Amino acid sequence: MSIQIGDQAPDFSLVSQTADGPQVIALSDLTADSHVLLLFVPMAFTGGCTAEFCSITKSLDAYTALDAKVVGISGDNPFAQEAWAKKEGIGLTLLSDYEHEVSEAYGVAYESFIPEANLIMGGVSKRSAFVVDKGGVVRYAEVLDNPHDMPDFDAIQACLKAL
């Protein structure tokens, strides 16, 4: 079962590849001074995930104005994420959930088969969005079974405006 609105968000520490090398980023550090939009995606270099993160990159200023940081999470290794970000111009922080532990903790991992994509890939994240407030409480939760569907970004921004 996935994390629900009102739940305490499970804290995590994941690696992001930065210009200065690998950096460990914890959710609790992010929520110390802003709200956080967590965007889980199935995998780097795929059409839907690229479209989602490129679109979000174009609107990062709107999220900053809403006092929110946006981070993307996938099971790809941080070096693949870095190559993907450079190739596609993705500007949000990408976090590697290589062991799929965070996807499991949030209840967004496919069990074994992704029928819409005809793939057998247990543990891969479902496309999902969670808004976590500064107190670490989930204020918005959306988990999509079909990897081609996109989160409701209007609803996400409305949630952030209300915080």
Image: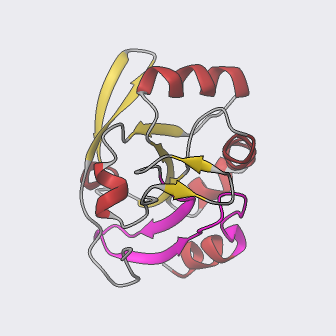
**Image check: 12 left or right of 79?**
left
Q: Is residue 129 magenta?
A: yes
**Location of residue 52 with respect to 79 vertically, above or below:** below
The quarter holding residue 3 reads: bottom left
Q: Nearer the viewer, residue 56 or 63?
A: 56
**Visual colour scheme:** secondary structure
Q: Nearer the viewer, residue 149 or 61?
A: 149
- Residue, x 34% and y 47% (percent of image)? 100
Residue 7 place in picture, x, y as percent:
30, 80
Residue furthest out toward the top: 20
- Residue, x 59% and y 35% (percent of image)? 44
**Location of residue 33 with respect to 3 vertically, above or below:** above
Q: Is residue 134 magenta?
A: yes
Residue 62 place in picture, x, y as percent:
67, 57
**Image check: 23 left or right of 91?**
left
Q: Which residues are magenta?
A: 125-154
**Image check: 64 left or right of 11?**
right
**Location of residue 105 with respect to 29 vertically, above or below:** below
Q: How many numbered discs, if any?
A: 0
- Residue, x 65% and y 66% (percent of image)? 151
- Residue, x 57% and y 64% (percent of image)? 66
The image quadrant where one finds the N terminus is: bottom left
Q: Nearer the viewer, residue 137 or 50?
A: 50
Residue 130 place in picture, x, y as percent:
47, 67
**Image check: 94 left or right of 46?**
left
The quarter holding residue 15 reads: top left
